[in-house]
Image (spheres, helix red, strand yellow):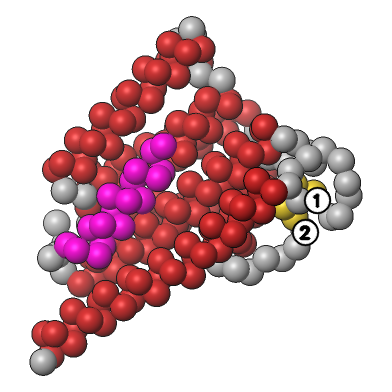
Amino acid sequence: MRNRGLVLLAALLLQLVLYPVVAEGDSQNISWIVAYWLATPLLGVVQLASRWWMIIVAALFMAVIVILALLTRVQVFSIPGEMLVLLGMAIYLSAAIAIGRAALFSRELVDNRLYAGFSAYLLIGYFFAAVHHWVWLQDPTAYEVGNRPGPADLHIADFIYFSFSTLTTAGFGDIVAVSRGARLVCMLEAVTGVLMPATFIARLLTEQMKRSG
């Protein structure tokens, strides 16, 4: 299907648009939004990735669900928030790799690859948001808000905001990483945010030059 990568990109951008709803903290709305967030990467893999990557990501998704359910001894739909963060990390990282690979090496139409590349970039941002959330769950003092020392009262919406400000190297400074683990995650995300677009653009330019030559 022509421009099928645009569907995933629109779905990921919608997640950003839903940020105010998440920030309000309505638990009923958040449960639906979290379900939407977990389904979006799978939609992207089905649309853009190869059959083998689709099988790998789907199998990983099911395996993580089963393992978390067994470890917590609860029903699949009652997985605790901490385990849900791990599930999000696994899904978004695997989807970002699969779709990023398709954006770099696929022989699809150029516009479709552009949408895939943008989508992979957003997937990385959501992955690191889950990583920051995980770090904070392990150490509530890992981040500071407004230079106020002590445990920070942060929410999933705060980690999304902080992740994308770090990924794009904007760094507004209202949320600050203070622990070594949190700073390491920030450095890795900032480097990824710079190198990933550069690699993607260089790949497309190289192919264009080969075709022109």
Mark 2 crowd level (few <14, some 14–19, many ≥20, 10 Å Cα): few
**As shown in the figure, which amino acid type bears the numbered disc 2?**
Asp
Q: State yes or no: discs 1 and 2 in contact (Cβ < 8 Å).
A: yes
Dividing the picture into quadrants, the one containing residue 60 is top left
Question: What residue is pinned by disc 2?
Answer: 174
Quadrant containing the N terminus is bottom left
Q: Earlier in the sequence, mark 1 or mark 2?
A: 1
Asked if residue 100 is among those painted magenta in the image, a careful observer would answer yes
Q: Is residue 135 above or below residue 121?
A: above
Q: Which residues, given as a range, are shown in magenta?
A: 90-106
Residue 199: image tag:
none
Instruction: Name the quadrant of the C terminus.
Output: bottom left
Q: Which secondary structure class fits the magenta region best?
A: helix
Q: Residue at x 29, y 43 (%)?
A: 43
**Residue at which label 1 appears:** 145
Q: Amino acid at mark 1?
A: Val
